[in-house]
Amino acid sequence: MTDSAAEFEPPPTRIVLYPDPVLARPASPVTAFDDAVHALVERMIELMRGAEGVGLAAPQVGVSRRIFIAEPEPGPESVPVVFINPELELGGTLEPFEEGCLSIPEVRVMVRRPSVVKIRAFDLDGHAFELEDDDFPARVWQHEFDHLEGVLITDRMSPRDRLAHRKRLKGMREDFEDAGR
């Protein structure tokens, strides 16, 4: 399968919510760095900023492609970093941190993740780059990478978090079914 403008038409209009099946399946690699990918990323940036997020993956807008954006320190001068077909190298110790997700509003859970991440990816023009971090950006990258693998914070919940959020998640499942999706 190759990427084409038709695959991203119409442009995403919203952030997809749990339990939409697109969130639970691994995304396909990007094979063309074309205008359609540029337009998709522009729309993702708009949606992420509109939701006051720090990252967003293509599956979260209904597009099952290996793309995510991250803007761990949003501000008037910040520019989101685009990661296409990323690969992670994890290290350090596992550290807990409370995470939320734009696809699962009002749910925050403790997630243990490696403290050090080296990421290799391609930018919008198909140029390879590599970054390394041991702070909040590393956590954002891992969270967004999980979306590309079909993994959600619900998959990483402790039994305590699962119990605490069971009513909210059940309501989201019922809303999804009621909408006929």
Image (spheres, rainbow, N blue to C red):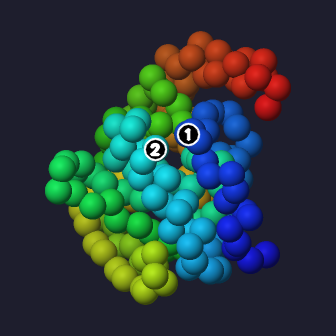
Q: Earlier in the sequence, mark 1 or mark 2?
A: 1
Question: In the image, residue 80 lies at what x, y percent?
Answer: 33, 60
Q: Residue at x 28, y 72 (%)?
A: 132
Q: Give me the C-alpha separation between circle 1 and circle 2.
A: 7 Å
Query: In this rendering, would 149 be left or right of 104?
Result: right
Q: Which mark is residue 15?
A: 1
Q: Residue at x 47, y 37 (%)?
A: 102
Helix, strand or loop at mark 2: helix
Q: Residues within 10 Å of mark 2 (few under 14, many from 20)?
A: some
Residue 145 appears in the figure: no
Quadrant in the picture for the C terminus = top right
Query: In this rendering, would 19 be left or right of 117?
Result: right
Quadrant in the picture for the N terminus = bottom right
Q: Amino acid at mark 2?
A: Leu
Quadrant for residue 18, please give it.
top right
Q: Which mark is residue 178?
A: none
Extreme residue in the bottom direction? 127
Answer whether labels 1 and 2 touch (C-beta < 8 Å). Answer: yes
Q: Amino acid at mark 1?
A: Ile
Q: Which mark is residue 47?
A: 2
Helix, strand or loop at mark 1: loop
Query: In this rendering, would 131 be left or right of 36?
Result: left
Question: In the image, residue 155 lies at what x, y percent?
Answer: 59, 40
Q: Residues within 10 Å of mark 1 (few under 14, many from 20)?
A: many
Front in this rendered view, residue 151 or 92: 151
